Image (spheres, grey):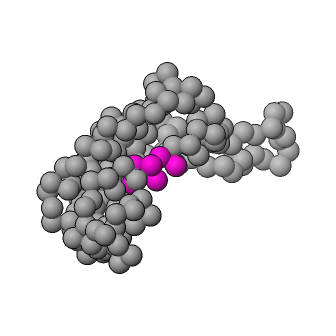
Amino acid sequence: MRRLLLVAAGLSALAAWLLLAPLGRSPDPVLSTEAPRTPRTMRPTQPLRRAVEPVQPTKWSEAAQKKIDKLGTRLYARAADCYHGGLPADRRLDLEYRVRVTSGEIAVSEARVTDSTLGDQALERCIVERVLSFRDRDPSLPDHETADDLYIRVGGFKPYLARVGSDGDDPL
């Protein structure tokens, strides 16, 4: 009798689970590029599509991104104007910034220091202000907004400064 009650309870639980489970769905859907399996006698009438269509490159991602990628070099040069020598060449500043293009006007809308070993708050503030003041115009660019990082090393200021000595540390 006890065994019969256990079997009946188990079957009841199974029936309840089947009734409450969503029909025709797997618990976690998985996208697949494989064709669904069909019996050998059936032939698909239309070509099978991929589960996820590839994203077509946009005008922005091809032409404009090349122009925006060069922006980091220009921002580095602007940051170099703040440096007046005296720091070791291996000191660095990591900066996140957001570029906004609106009607051909290019502007840095946000900038913030994410990490720094400069040890000079005034220099950090000056670099952020110089980056934020960047403005340019290119009517060929579509409206867009993107974020990027800029990693600045004190030794990297050398190409932009005529007043820094060959060792990168002291002004001439």
Q: Position of residue 55 (x, y in %)?
A: 62, 39
Taking depth in this image into account, of 144 and 68 the one nearest to the observer is: 68
Taking depth in this image into account, of 115 and 22 the one nearest to the observer is: 115
Q: Main secondary structure of the magenta part?
A: helix
In the rendered image, the vertical position of residue 101 relative to residue 49, given as above or below? above
Q: Is residue 103 magenta?
A: no
Would residue 140 appear left or right of 136 to someone viewing this image? right
Is residue 3 visible to the viewer in this orientation of the structure? no
Who's the residue at 52% across and 37% down the image?
A: 24
Taking depth in this image into account, of 7 and 110 the one nearest to the observer is: 110
Would residue 157 appear left or right of 58 to someone viewing this image? left
Who's the residue at 52% across and 49% down the image?
A: 70
Q: Position of residue 109 (x, y in %)?
A: 33, 35
In the rendered image, the vertical position of residue 168 relative to residue 18, given as above or below? below
Who's the residue at 39% across and 54% down the image?
A: 76
Question: Where on the picture, by quarter, is residue 16?
Answer: top left
Give the magenta-colored segment's residue range: 69-76
Q: Position of residue 86 (x, y in %)?
A: 21, 70
Single out the residue that lies furthest toward the front: 172
Question: Where on the picture, by quarter, is residue 122?
Answer: bottom left
Would residue 148 appear left or right of 131 to someone viewing this image? right
Who's the residue at 20% across and 56% down the image?
A: 123
Number of numbered discs: 0
Is residue 79 visible to the viewer in this orientation of the structure? yes
Single out the residue that lies furthest toward the bottom: 167
In the rendered image, the vertical position of residue 95 relative to residue 110, given as above or below? below
Q: Is residue 75 magenta?
A: yes
Q: Position of residue 19 (x, y in %)?
A: 39, 36
In the rendered image, the vertical position of residue 73 relative to residue 162, given as above or below? above
Report the quarter where the C terminus lies: bottom left
Report the quarter where the N terminus lies: bottom left
